[in-house]
Amino acid sequence: MGSSDPATSQLAQQRARGIRTALIIAAVVVVLRYLPLTGDLFLFSKIENFAYDIAFDTRQPRPPSDIVIIAIDDDSLLPDRLGQWPWPRDVHARLLSRLSAARIVAFDVLFTEPDSDHPAADARFAQAIQQHGRVVLAAYKRTRADYKQSASAKMPAYPRPSGGAGPLQPIQPMNFTPPIPSFAQAAAGIGYVDIEPDSDGVYRRMLPLRVGYDRHIYPHFATEIARLAAGTSPEQVVKSVPDSHLAVAGRSIPLNRQGAALINYCGPTGTVPRYSYWAVLTGEEPTDVFKDKIVLIGASAPGLYDIRPAPYPSHKRFFLGVETNANIVNTLLYMPPLKDSSRAAGALLFALLLGTVAGWMVWSSSEVVGPLVGGLLVVLVGLPSFFVLFHLAHQILPYGAIVLATALPVGLGIYERLGAERRMMREQFSVYVSPDVLQMLMRNPDMIREGRQREVTLLFADVRGSTTLSEKAAPEVWLTQLNEYMSQMTTVIFAYDGYLDKFMGDGIMAIWNAFGMENNHAELAVRAALGMLARLDALNQYWEQAADRTPFRIGIGLHTGEAVMGDAGSDQRRQYTAIGDTVNTASRIEAMNKELGTTLIISETTAQQTEGLFELREIGEMPVRGRSEPIRIFEVLGEKA
């Protein structure tokens, strides 16, 4: 309006406030994600787990070439085959003889109690383990320590590196329950099979090592398999632990602050090749299939296996425990190590910068372009960032921080930006127009976007003898009465869709067609003037009954003509108003009431536009101060019957 948009300075202040708010929101999100106490809040973990799962679920499966599973399946449990579990352990001895060419054989089965019904079978199995020489067995962690455990029954451990245990989590070694001593002594390695799920029950990470209170380091089942398969010594595995890394087969596996490593799954359930225990035992599967392979033996039959949900929502997250261990081995030996950068300073700084820039972009340009560019930054940079870094750099970003630090400032900024002008209109015009006109302005803000010249009808009203009235009454009484009058007149003006431009002491200025919405603006203005007089009569009757009130008269003048409508004023205060000769003329016409002893007079242009609607008395031409030519005026007597 005029040379600038409405309330330009207010928009500039709101823009600065919006950019500042974006920075604050992004900073708060990043700090919350970084702090240990708040970093695992539900909202962060929900977003990050979802992205992690989608990344795996949409990636092509990568079956390992030398890791296989022999499944204790339904076929093997049939009564005419091996029958009900558990089987006599010499069955496993027979299986080992079929797997003599395998690089590693790992039993994802617990043998923590001797078989009292078949003691000879235990001896044969121990002998088979010893003869094979490359068998890894499983241990598990009890909830309570067994302090009566003999030294020979303790789980084997790695030496502690000279630099300390780094981020490894502590454990009481007496909590471990290894296989029975004859099996443990014969095995090439033993590791614990315990693994903790994330808060949503999905297994995404594991603890490859734990440090005992005896200062020794204990390996996970999969860690021991990978170590033996790669020919890595325990000393080599733990040498980088102080630096939060695990070393296997010349590869460095990063550990997070809790000593956990992310599992880089090779695919959904069934990706790791699986063979039936019975088929292998009976020779249906040739032994060459397992030559130089890492073989994990575990349950797949319902009722035997443990379900460990994996990040594959399209497969209902179904995953076998033995498959989880196979994937951990594959992660340690072959898959690209995933780096947990969820609390890395660089990743969190990226979230802060992106959120600040995106929030700034919302306010940096026009009302449409700014929110569009800010939204595009979220969609094209923020949302894909996790998946780009996951696939290209094998990094896990603090996706919750990135999404929230960008989406919240942008979302709030878009809401504020797209609604800013309308809210300012509501603030600016709610006291000047009727609710219906205000709603129309909110829907069509272009009506007042810039200064325009249009035909309007202006109304000026003034209280007669107000100076004398104010001197007779107490100030607070006169002010109260004047407010009662103004309130009633405003109600009438709004009822006829007028724009209340201003109060001038006890005077009123109102405009019709201020926004170019009324074709019958002259008629509406005259009807409003008659309504004001009728309302004043009612007020005077009320005031006559009050001892501290004095009835009074007013004069009203109306004129129709061209005026410039726009937002005028200073940077500190602006108002939408009419400017031009028409305004001055309307004010002069109202003042003529004093000379003529009339109450409501209108100009010839107003009379022409309301012809036939009202009873008029022509007064004649009257000189108007500031105009070279006189103006013809009429007194309005009322509506025609």
Image (spheres, rainbow, N blue to C red):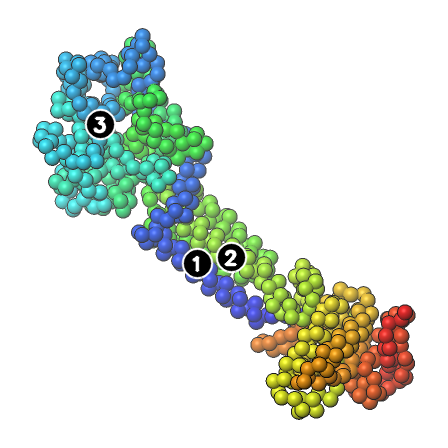
- The Cα atoms of the two marked residues, 1 and 2, are separated by 10 Å
User: Mark 2 belongs to which amino acid?
Assistant: Leu
Q: Residue at x 58, y 58 (%)?
A: 418
Q: Is residue 584 above or below residue 242?
A: below
Q: Is residue 473 above or below residue 499?
A: below
Q: Position of residue 7 (x, y in %)?
A: 60, 70
Observer-nearest of 92 and 229: 92
Q: Is residue 570 above or below residue 342?
A: below
Residue 509, numbered label: none
Q: Position of residue 435 (x, y in %)?
A: 68, 64
- The Cα atoms of the two marked residues, 3 and 1, are separated by 49 Å
Residue 138, numbered label: 3
Q: CB of mark 1 within 8 Å of CB of mark 2?
A: yes
Q: Earlier in the sequence, mark 3 or mark 2?
A: 3
User: Mark 3 belongs to which amino acid?
Assistant: Ala
Residue 25, numbered label: 1
